[in-house]
Image (spheres, helix red, strand yellow):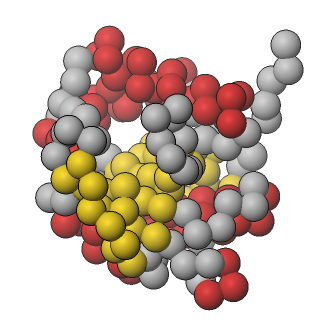
């Protein structure tokens, strides 16, 4: 069986890398908390495992996926960012999650920029979308700070979400 090597990408203050088994406890903790209310949570540890497996397997199935985001200064797991495209999506999505205690430091912005730039150059994924729950004001502000604009509002039966379109590589 062929295994896909997940690239390591450096931002100015973060390093994007593949998930490790030791990351799962922090991942499950995030998804068990109210912080996960905009991304299908809170959820129990078993369901979080399915989500973790899905996020990590995208690399093998699609050739791109989610990275763990660690801080360059301490190596702490700050969250995750990357490109996801489950079978029920119409297109790839640039998504991000930040753990409690890592907000307000520019980590999500740095990680999302690094992931988006890498996706543009390595995967030829230009003009990515971010699907953001209508009530997730922090992610909406981040998308707008990244230069994305709201192009549509949809609902798959779990509440309204906005489709934010990121700028083309040459416009970013």
- How many numbered marks are there? 0
Q: Quadrant of residue 132?
A: bottom left
Whole-percent x and y of residue 11? 61, 66
Most extreme residue toward the bottom is 171
Decide if residue 78 is on the left or right side of residue 156: right
Residue positioned 80% across, 24% down in the render: 3
* One can see residue 22 in this view: no
Which quadrant of the rendered structure holds the N terminus? top right
Whole-percent x and y of residue 15? 61, 54
Nearer to us in this view, 94 or 155: 155
In the image, residue 140 above or below residue 149: above
Residue positioned 42% across, 47% down in the render: 79
Q: Quadrant of residue 172?
A: bottom right
Decide if residue 50 is on the left or right side of residue 66: left
Whole-percent x and y of residue 73? 53, 59
* One can see residue 148 in this view: yes
Decide if residue 79 is on the left or right side of residue 41: right
In the image, residue 40 above or below residue 118: above
Residue positioned 79% across, 35% down in the render: 5
Whole-percent x and y of residue 35? 20, 44
Q: Quadrant of residue 60?
A: top right
Nearer to us in this view, 29 or 169: 169
Decide if residue 121 is on the left or right side of residue 76: right
In the image, residue 146 above or below residue 47: below
Nearer to us in this view, 78 or 109: 109
Most extreme residue toward the right is 2
Residue positioned 27% across, 42% down in the render: 156
């Amino acid at each position: 069986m062929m295994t896909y090597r997940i690239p390591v990408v450096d931002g100015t203050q973060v390093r994007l890398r593949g998930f490790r088994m030791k990351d799962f406890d922090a991942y499950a903790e995030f998804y068990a908390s109210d912080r996960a209310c905009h991304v299908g949570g809170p959820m129990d540890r078993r369901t979080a495992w399915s989500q973790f497996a899905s996020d990590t397997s995208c690399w093998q199935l699609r050739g791109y996926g989610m990275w763990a985001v660690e801080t360059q200064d301490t190596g702490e797991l700050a969250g995750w960012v990357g490109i996801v495209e489950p079978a029920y999506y119409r297109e790839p999505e640039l998504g991000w999650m930040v753990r409690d205690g890592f907000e307000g430091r520019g980590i999500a912005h740095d990680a999302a920029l690094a992931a988006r730039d890498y996706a543009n150059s390595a995967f030829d994924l230009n003009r990515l979308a971010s699907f953001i729950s209508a009530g997730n004001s922090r992610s909406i502000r981040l998308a707008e700070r990244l230069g994305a604009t709201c192009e549509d509002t949809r609902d798959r039966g779990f509440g309204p979400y906005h489709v934010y379109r990121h700028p083309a590589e040459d416009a970013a």
